[in-house]
Amino acid sequence: MRRAMPLAFGIAVLAIAAACGGNPPPQAPQPNADSLAAAERARQDSLAREQAIRDSIERARREAEERIRRASEDSLAALRRGTEEVRGMVTAMINFDFDKSDIRPGDAQVLDRKLAVLQANPGLTIEIVGHCDERGSDEYNLALGNRRALSAKQYLVSRGIDAGRISTRSMGEEQPVNPGHDETAWAQNRRDEFGITAGGDVLMRPPGM
Amino acid sequence: MTGPVFSSSSPRTLRSPRLVFFPGAPWAWAVAAAVAAWSAPLRAQDTLRPPVEQGVRVGITYTPGLRPGLLVLGGPRRDLLDSVRAIVRRDLDDSDRFEMITLPGSDSLMVAVGAGMGAPAAGTKSGSFVNYALYQALGADYTVDVVDRPDSGIAVMVYDVKGGGVRKAIPVPVTDLKSPDFRFDVHRASDEVVRAAAGTPGIAATRILFENNRRVYRVDADGADAVAITQPGGGTMSPTWAPDGRRMVYSEQAGPIRRLVVVDVASGQRDVVGPTTTGVNFAPAFSPDGRTLAFSRSDEDGTHIYAYNLADHCCLQRLTAGRFSDNLSPTFSPDGRRIAFVSTRAGAPQIYAMSADGTEQELFAPFDYGVTGSSYAPEWSPDGLHLAFHRDVAGTYQIFVMDVASRSVRQLTSAGRNEDPTWAPDGRHLAFVSSRTGTRQIWVMDMDTGRVRQLTRLDGARLPSWSPRVSDTNHH
């Protein structure tokens, strides 16, 4: 592709040179039918050559445009892929021990990634929803879920995120992700979910991530 | 004669008055009525009985049965009487105040024709139905029967076995089995039987709200007529009766928030409680005068108890403070002056109390720090003497009751997981959630005898609230 334009251009130049070089030198004004016909042919040839040049330029232009279009599509897709990846960092859940709202050491890293994303995307606002397993007391679980949501929010706010960018609420034990009745299910259900409430269409990847 | 059969569904204390209930076998009644009527054509002249309350004359009850039209009159009437009899018998059993004595049909017929055995009734024709001497020998204090009234109504009769007369005749207004009020009218009569025999009314004419599959359900105190009364998809929780028994309040999910809705039960009219349109609002409780709603709210400030003047739609007041503790599940004392609630101020949730204005906060149910399990969901008994709640015992929940005066705490359950107790208006029965059969269902316990019965048989049930006694039929 990249070689096409010079090649076409070279052929065009050669064609012009051949056309010029191939013609007899102009003679004294002795017009005759043959020379008139020859002139006409030359004129026609010249028109055809000009057309060929125009065509080749047009072709080259279209090809260039196509390349630019593809390149920008590639970069949009890359941007979109990046946004998805960053969004995944924002929405990754964290889990809790039974009847606890402390952030577990492993989950601090998950929150640190969210922190970096929030810093890299000042327009991004999120919602944290606290959930509980079915073992706790039904109504108390609404309070416990609230504490879990506030706990994650506090982690982010204490590291510099504006409190107004994070809303919180509790679903108690009303929305389990795993409907089972064993420790595996309970462990999955004791969680904070993170949702994007605004500014999440294009997300910049935090530096170094 | 094989002799009378004594049956009792569970061991009882011997303090309970003994109560004979006439059997409900239709044929036994038909025969007994025919025999009695044949031998007593002048029953209406019976003057040996004490005056009967409310104009019901005992003795003419089966006179229609003697007439040729017996079978015509008898069909639906027998169905009605038998249905009433079955409901009353169960209500009296569920009151847990009596030792129920059951006579099989054949024996009761023998008893019925054994004229002369009952002292006060001896020689009177109608006395053949109430054989006081025999029932006294069986250990009965009261005998209950369901009879026709001359005005085409029916009545529940309470006979005083020792005194030898009618203690009370309780008219039952409904004569149609298909009437929507039928069962509840009979329950009211049952409660009057309990009043006549035990001095305090029963709790049959009450209803329990609960939640199942995010909908509010209502069930009669005998377990009948369990129906959903809110639409699916409402995400409802915490249904709670108002003290007038005409309104209820519950928490419903509305997008990101949970709000409280007061519903007039008869009309279905809904009113969203004004200040509950932000945050997660739940676990509401009416003040005893019905004017104030206390509730819990979880939001950015944590979880706290608020009070709102429902009567004047004003004056939202936050009653608890503190950034580092959750406060929830308020319950008013019956005089309206105190509120018990759950707080995490000492770490694990425990039961505290405060004045209704939020002052004078104190630990209410004593606990040993780090030893006593977390405690939840307090409800003050209607007589003010007790506080019921549930507490973590070895990783599951059990029902506890605290004696308010002495602050002594006693565990009432041990089988399965048991939680969220609610008091019956008699102050001695509790409904609660139990998983003892595998699924969470509502159960009823009598605190005095320890007797338990299962109230619901659905795919699940939780968060019950027991109504006050309901005086009018317009309660559905």
Image: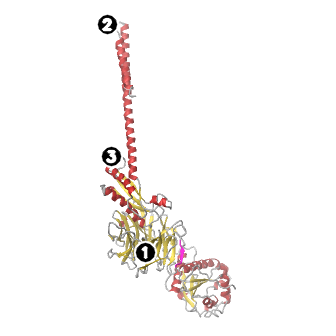
Q: Amino acid at mark 3?
A: Pro
Query: Given the image, on which type of amino acid does mark 1 rest?
Result: Glu
Write down the residue under mark 3.
Answer: A207
Quadrant position of the N terminus of chain B in the picture? bottom right
- Residue B451 falls within the magenta-colored stretch: yes
First of labels 3, 2 by sequence position: 2
Mark 2 neighbour class, 10 Å CA radius: few under 14, some 14 to 19, many 20 or more: few
Please say whether residue A156 is one of the residues in the magenta stretch. Answer: no
Q: Position of residue B137 (x, y in %)?
A: 62, 90
Mark 1 sits on what residue?
B379
Of circles 3 and 1, the one toward us is: 3
Q: Using the numbered discs, state the Cα–Cα distance from disc 3 to disc 2 in whole angstroms.
A: 75 Å
Left or right for A133, reference A12 = right
Tell me whether circle 3 and circle 2 mark residues in contact (CB < 8 Å): no
Location of mark 2 (residue) = A27
The chain letter for the residue carrying disc 2 is A
Point out the stretch of residues depicted in magenta: B450-455
> Which residue appears at 36% of the width and 60% of the height?
A151
Q: Is residue A40 left or right of residue B175?
A: left
